[in-house]
Amino acid sequence: MKLFKIFEKELKIVSFFKYFCVLIIINSVYSCAVPEFAKPKKIDRNTPVNAKERARKNVEEGRGVSLKGVLGGNNSTNYEFSTSNPLWRASLEIIDFMPLSTVDYSGGVIITDWYNDGNNSTESIKITIRFLSNEVRSDSIKIIVHNKKCNISENCGINEIDSKLKFELQKSILTKAANLEKDKKIKK
């Protein structure tokens, strides 16, 4: 008899545990919303299936490139490439000995990596050139030179410096850009 009561007690506990688990699962399924990444994406029914039709639609909506727009259509977009910008070309030619970290023509910035000429192993420089205009003028570029000095224990201090190097770079870039622009006019 005692054995039967113990078995009955364990059966009630197991049965209670099963019902409790089922309740938790049902509650979690019905109470949770579907996360955004699991929801199906809405499909634009107006998008053509054919690739040529899709390209034509993109060009008509201004999301593509057409020769009409480049060659003098009514769009005001100016397509200019880095090879046609004398300031850009001159800057890259002047600092071609330095490793480059970021070169972004559309953003108008060139950033070199830290450069050390080998004479002083504890000191390095980094140059940032920002293009403010495509015209060859002294206010068309902004040059920032950073200096990094490190101790033997690798404690480094980084400061922006306002040295002759900054003005010499600007002068060299502007002179080179003016020469490139002059050569371009002569070739035409």
Image (tube, helix red, strand yellow):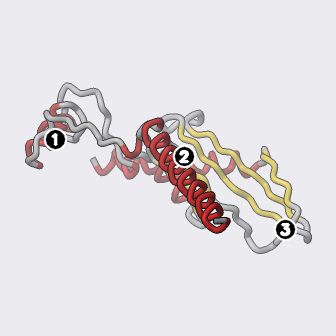
Residue at the spot of label 1: 67
| Sooner in the amino-acid sequence: mark 2 or mark 3 | 2
Residue 182 is situated, as x and y percent measured from the top left of the image, at 41, 46
Q: Is residue 187 visible?
A: yes
Q: Amino acid at mark 1?
A: Leu
Would you place residue 116 above or below residue 61 in this image?
A: below
Residue at the spot of label 3: 122
Q: Quadrant of residue 7?
A: bottom right
| Sooner in the amino-acid sequence: mark 1 or mark 2 | 1
The reply, left or right, for residue 48 in relation to residue 62 is: left
Closest to the observer, 40 or 31: 31
The reply, left or right, for residue 70 in relation to residue 18 is: left
Q: CA distance from mark 1 to mark 2?
A: 28 Å
Q: Amino acid at mark 3?
A: Thr
The reply, left or right, for residue 106 in relation to residue 9 is: left
Residue at the spot of label 2: 109
Q: Are marks 1 and 2 in contact (CB under 8 Å)?
A: no
Q: Amino acid at mark 2?
A: Val
Residue 126 is situated, as x and y percent measured from the top left of the image, at 70, 56
Closest to the observer, 179 or 42: 42
Closest to the observer, 58 or 166: 58
The reply, left or right, for residue 70 in relation to residue 38 is: left
Q: Quadrant of residue 118?
A: bottom right
